[in-house]
Image (cartoon, coloured by chain):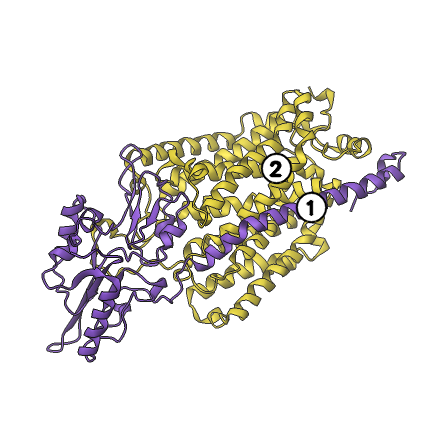
């Protein structure tokens, strides 16, 4: 297709890569300051607020927006709905880079980043964070394996690509299991704070809420990522596929909304809906932006088939759901009161993210976007156009060859 | 001195004069830098109008819970609950994730935000002075308290003492010993003449806050295995089904190949 020729001049010296590189450089310098002088030197984290912007944005949001990978991998490999295959590689790539960004961000946030591997050998089985750590590390490996064929194809090592493909199924299943576990247990992370998290959010069913909303976030992310990359790389948009994904969103959101309000009613917490001041406002904001509006929007065929409307809907959903992650992990968490005669190190009882904190996250995010761009340029991430796709459907009777279709020999 | 089976503190807020000698004693005993402390004094300050003035303060340090939430939360098991009471932290395992700070309902563990990776940033909290209690001495804070607001001994004995004191002065004390059942029981018992919330203590039930999260964690492995088995089953089923279909519709006409559902 024409895309091979049109990408390159656009991407060669765009303004975007330069901005991204600059942001990465700044983040690197800030991170060095943090490693030398301590977390307190660059952040507003304190005795009262051990977790802040990094955890809410890099961990909670980062993991949630990476959930598209397991959804599409499961759909294509396990359910064998092959038509979604054009979305497979970009989704797996997004997920892989997303988790990589989470891991890098945690290396800044952890007090002892050099000991992160202790999670592999010292296990405390009651710790939710251990489960998340193990799952994220394993899933990163699984995603690397799932994406490896694309890299091998890029280097024209077809044998290796096919070799991995023979054994891909167990990894796909493992990937879905690991994703289910840690997407939900990100919610379980807050289960230990019934005394701190506001009752509008704290519920024993937090893991279920998180998993359900992660599905809707994953679907929206696929729409966002396809739409943006189709604009940036000027390639075709798989609008018929995105339409189908968007159709599933209202269903998922309806289930999520029912769960959420059902649980509130069951726990007798409905009274907080209008009486908790700012907390009530935040709750309604995330419900209206993240659930109600997208549910209505994506119910219309006209919206689902219009690229601009589709993208807008996805962005609205993501904003609302990201607000949910921030609420659960930050805004709705009540920290110990400043009721003490405070020693100096405890003196900061209010938290507001500092500029360096945000710069670190921004830099890591930029690295992810740049990596996506480079991969999209040099690896066959989007190269499954009509020819490749249909050749596959006709010619692969065996399971698991969806990722290794022949790269058109005339690509250069 | 008789051996103590369950080391416990008893604090009586009516006796505390807010002198903070315990803070100094603790820092000296445990070699804590000047800008940090393992103990702090909580309270509301002065209340009421002259001449009916009132104030209440409380020595706040690790509660040494019977079911510690820091221990439950720590991913690498850096915390350890000794059978005779104290909750101990081992810096050699700590990865600095600060989940314990989130988990602790009392906000006890704190972190070296001012240390880089070369100095090593660790969690710090009250250790119950094992170097003293294992040698038959009282913890430093208790030994130094000039008014006996802080006492130390066997948990059952101290509970008895506490209730006896309430019985002797029912007008003076709130009829409750904080820490007897709160958060599943703690090794730090508190008597007070003002509501406990005014001393900065959270309102906790008799079940430890880690109960739900531990129950969910117990279900994780069975759930993972079950879900994995279900997915394997679905994979096999779909594969069989679609192979049959493809065998039937052998001559592949590119446009019309049915998408497997």
Along the horizontal axis of the image, is B257 left or right of A65? Answer: right
- The dot on residue A92 is 2
> Are labels 1 and 2 on one chain?
yes
As drawn, which residue projects farthest toward the front? B2
- Between B21 and A113, the residue placed more toward the observer is B21
> Within 10 angstroms of label 1, few (less than 14), some, or many (20 or more) residues?
many
> Within 10 angstroms of label 2, few (less than 14), some, or many (20 or more) residues?
many
- Between A254 and A307, the residue placed more toward the observer is A254
Q: Quadrant of the N terminus of chain B?
A: bottom left
- Between A18 and A173, the residue placed more toward the observer is A173
Secondary structure type for disc 2: helix
Q: Colour of chain B?
A: purple
Secondary structure type for disc 1: helix
Q: Is residue A230 above or below residue B145?
A: above
Q: Cα distance, mark 1 to mark 2?
A: 16 Å
- The picture places residue A243, in percent across and down from the top left corner, at 71, 48
Q: Is residue A366 above or below residue A336?
A: above
């Amino acid at each position: 297709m024409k895309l091979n020729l049109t990408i390159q001049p656009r991407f060669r010296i765009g303004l975007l890569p330069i901005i991204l590189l600059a942001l990465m450089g700044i983040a690197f310098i800030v991170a060095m300051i943090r490693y030398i002088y301590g977390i307190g030197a660059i952040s507003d984290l304190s005795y009262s607020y051990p977790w802040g912007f990094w955890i809410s944005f890099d961990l909670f949001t980062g993991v949630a927006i990476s959930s598209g990978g397991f959804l599409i991998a499961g759909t294509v490999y396990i359910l064998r709905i092959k038509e979604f295959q054009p979305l497979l590689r970009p989704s797996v790539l997004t997920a892989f880079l997303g988790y990589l960004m989470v891991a890098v961000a945690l290396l800044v946030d952890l007090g002892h980043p050099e000991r992160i591997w202790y999670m592999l050998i010292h296990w405390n089985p009651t710790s939710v964070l251990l489960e998340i750590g193990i799952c994220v590390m394993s899933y990163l490996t699984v995603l690397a394996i799932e994406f490896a064929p694309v890299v091998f194809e890029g280097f024209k090592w077809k044998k290796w690509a096919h070799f991995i493909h023979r054994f891909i199924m167990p990894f796909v299943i493992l990937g879905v299991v690991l994703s289910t576990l840690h997407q939900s247990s990100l919610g379980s992370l807050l289960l230990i704070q019934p005394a701190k998290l506001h009752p509008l959010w704290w519920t024993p069913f937090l893991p279920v809420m998180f998993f359900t909303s992660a599905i809707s976030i994953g679907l929206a992310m696929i729409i966002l990522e396809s739409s943006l990359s189709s604009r940036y790389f000027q390639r075709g948009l798989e609008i018929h596929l995105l339409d189908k994904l968007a159709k599933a969103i209202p269903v998922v959101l309806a289930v999520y909304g029912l769960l959420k309000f059902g649980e509130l009613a069951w726990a007798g917490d409905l009274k907080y809906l209008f009486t908790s001041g700012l907390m009530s406002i935040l709750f309604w904001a995330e419900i209206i932006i993240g659930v109600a509006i997208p549910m209505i929007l994506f119910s219309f065929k006209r919206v689902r088939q219009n690229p601009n409307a589709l993208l807008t809907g996805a962005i609205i959903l993501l904003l609302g759901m990201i607000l949910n992650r921030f609420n659960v992990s930050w805004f709705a968490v009540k920290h110990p009161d400043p009721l003490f005669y405070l020693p100096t190190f405890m003196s900061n009882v209010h938290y507001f993210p500092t500029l360096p904190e945000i710069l670190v996250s921004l830099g890591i995010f930029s690295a992810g976007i740049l990596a996506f761009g480079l991969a999209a340029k040099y690896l066959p991430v989007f190269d499954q156009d009509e020819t490749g796709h249909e050749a596959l459907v006709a010619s692969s009777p065996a399971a698991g060859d969806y990722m290794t279709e022949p790269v058109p020999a005339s690509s250069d | 001195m008789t051996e103590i089976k369950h080391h416990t503190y008893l604090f009586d807020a009516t006796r505390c004069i807010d002198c903070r000698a315990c803070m100094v004693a603790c820092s000296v005993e445990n070699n804590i830098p000047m800008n940090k402390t393992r103990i702090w004094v909580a309270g509301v300050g002065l209340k009421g109008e002259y001449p009916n003035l009132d104030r209440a303060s409380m020595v706040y340090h690790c509660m040494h819970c019977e079911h510690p939430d820091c221990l439950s939360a720590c991913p690498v098991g850096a915390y350890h609950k000794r059978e005779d009471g104290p909750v101990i932290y081992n810096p050699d395992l700590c990865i600095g994730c600060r989940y314990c700070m989130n988990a602790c309902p009392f906000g006890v563990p704190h972190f070296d935000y001012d240390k880089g990776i070369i100095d090593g940033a660790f969690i710090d909290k009250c250790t119950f002075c094992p170097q003293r209690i294992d040698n038959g001495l009282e913890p430093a804070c208790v030994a130094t308290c000039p008014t006996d607001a802080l006492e130390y001994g066997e948990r059952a004995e101290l509970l008895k003492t506490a209730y006896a004191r309430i019985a002797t002065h029912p007008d003076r004390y709130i009829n409750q010993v904080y820490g007897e059942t709160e958060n599943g029981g703690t090794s730090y018992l508190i008597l007070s003449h003002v509501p406990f919330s005014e001393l900065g203590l959270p309102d906790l039930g008799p079940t430890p806050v880690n109960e739900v999260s531990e129950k969910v964690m117990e279900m994780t492995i069975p759930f993972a295995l079950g879900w994995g088995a279900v997915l394997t089953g679905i994979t096999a089923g779909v594969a069989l089904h679609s192979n049959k279909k493809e065998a039937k519709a052998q001559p592949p006409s590119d446009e019309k190949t049915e998408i497997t559902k």
